[in-house]
Image (cartoon, grey):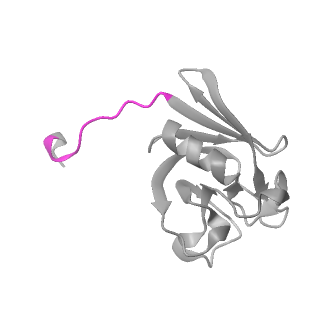
Amino acid sequence: MPRASLGPYNEIYTHLVIDRKLFTATLYKRGKAVFRTRVGVGKPYWPTPAGEFFVRERITGFSDLIYGPLAFGTNARSAVLTDWPGGGFIGIHGTNQPEILPGRVSHGCVRMPNSAVLRLSRLMSLGTPVTII
């Protein structure tokens, strides 16, 4: 495919780190922490996978409030949720149940308070690297 057929390059200065043991999400911009929140991660039998990933899409308009006002789709995939749409991709999203946070509360996705995911949406762009430790 010719380079001219593709869109422009996009420089990314952010990096999101999810810590499954501390139940935190920290966004770094040019190496400096600019956002931090408590999160929920996958239950032991539906674990949030560790590794290096990236934000591939932004999703809004959910009919189920459990996902909050928006979600970030990543390229991380669950090894155990193979029957989910698209094969069990892991998302980062809000929740209508903030009282369950922090903890091991999900099917593998990363949940955070709705106010936090809305703030994150103003700070983080598509393509942002995501490290889950």
- The relative height of residue 25 versus residue 34 in the rendered view (above or below) is below
x and y percentages locating residue 112 in the rendered image: 70, 51
The x and y percentages for residue 12 are: 43, 31
| Picture layout, residue 42 above or below residue 19 | below
Q: Is residue 7 left or right of residue 91?
A: left
Q: Residue at x 77, y 54 (%)?
A: 40
Count of all numbered marks drawn on residues in the image:
0
Instruction: Pick out the residue farthest to the bottom.
Output: 83
Q: Is residue 109 left or right of residue 55?
A: right
- Residue furthest front in the image: 115
Residue 62 x, y percent position in the rendering: 53, 70
Q: Check if residue 9 falls in the magenta segment.
A: yes
Question: In the image, 45: left or right of 94?
Answer: right
Residue at left 83%, top 50%? 102
Which x, y percent locates residue 109? Answer: 68, 59
Quadrant in the rendering for residue 41: bottom right
Q: Main secondary structure of the magenta part?
A: loop
> Residue, x 73% and y 67% (percent of image)?
107
The residue stretch that appears in magenta = 4-13
Q: Magenta includes 17?
A: no
Question: What quarter of the picture does the C terminus occupy?
Answer: top right
Residue at figure coordinates x 67%, y 68% from the top left:
66
Judge whether residue 67 can be spotted in this image. Answer: yes
Residue 93 vs residue 9, the one in the foreground: 93
In front of the other: 88 or 13: 13
Res. 133 visible in picture: no
Left or right, residue 34 beside residue 50: left
